[in-house]
Amino acid sequence: MKNKITLLLLLISSFGAYAQAKGNIEFGIGTGYSTSNLDATANSNLNYDYRSSYNVSAFADFYINDRWSFRGRVFYDRKGYNNEQLTDADGFIFSTNVELNYITIPVTANWHFGRKRNWYLNFGPYVGFLAGVNETRFGVDLTDEFNNVDAGLAFGVGVKIPLNNKLRLFIEYDYQGGFADVFKNDIDYYGYYGSENNNYTTSRGAFNVGLNFLLK
């Protein structure tokens, strides 16, 4: 029992090991479980379902003091939505799911808080570049039906757990909400990617884990 208490105290003390300072640079890599969907800008009779997938990312944090940093990040984001209704060349209506793959680049301001600044909030804009679109039932490539660029706002909250003087484990939740219409042609229900006089934007939330490395 005494050994367990000692180990717990060591873990707690290491958790508050250090805070960053002006001029420090951190590099990080991570991955996460994400859920995504499309949101209509007006009332719609299209009811898409959330799609689960994953993301991977790399980023750099540039500290201006122990409370604030600017982060540039690159995600490979597997977004999408379920329960799409499409029409084939013979007029047959079928239900399928849609995978939207993006290279997403958020640039955020990070506010670090807590006694040792191990907690953080971040917020800022992002831009996403379409890497490909497929429907899952027949594997049809739908990339040409979607706009090549997405944009919106990103925000998140997380904690970094020191492992040693140069390495930290992070756990975070991050969200992306798009402003740009994903469809090139919003024609009508059943098959033509959206609804007339309506725009559809992406939304994605993710729980991420990864490692931070102090470079400077």
Image (spheres, rainbow, N blue to C red):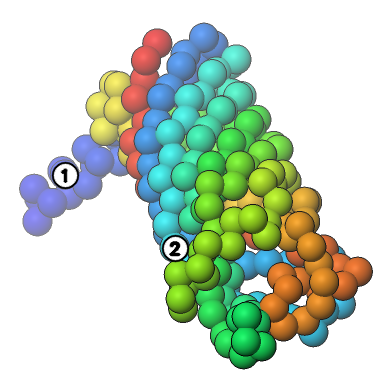
Residue 7's mark? 1
Q: Residues within 10 Å of mark 2 (few under 14, many from 20)?
A: some
Q: Amino acid at mark 2?
A: Ser
- The correct choice, above or below, for 173 with respect to 210 in the image is below
Q: Amino acid at mark 1?
A: Leu
The residue at the point 13 percent across, 51 percent down is 4
Q: Of 116 and 191, which appears nearest the observer?
A: 191
Q: CA distance from mark 1 to mark 2?
A: 36 Å
In this picture, residue 44 sits left or right of residue 214: right
In the rendered image, the residue lying farthest to the right is 197
Q: Which residue is mark 2?
A: 53
- Identify the image quadrant of residue 168: top left
Q: Can you see residue 87? A: yes
In this picture, residue 154 sits left or right of residue 136: right
Query: Where is residue 110 drawn, in percent x and y?
Result: 60, 32
Q: Quadrant of the N terminus?
A: bottom left
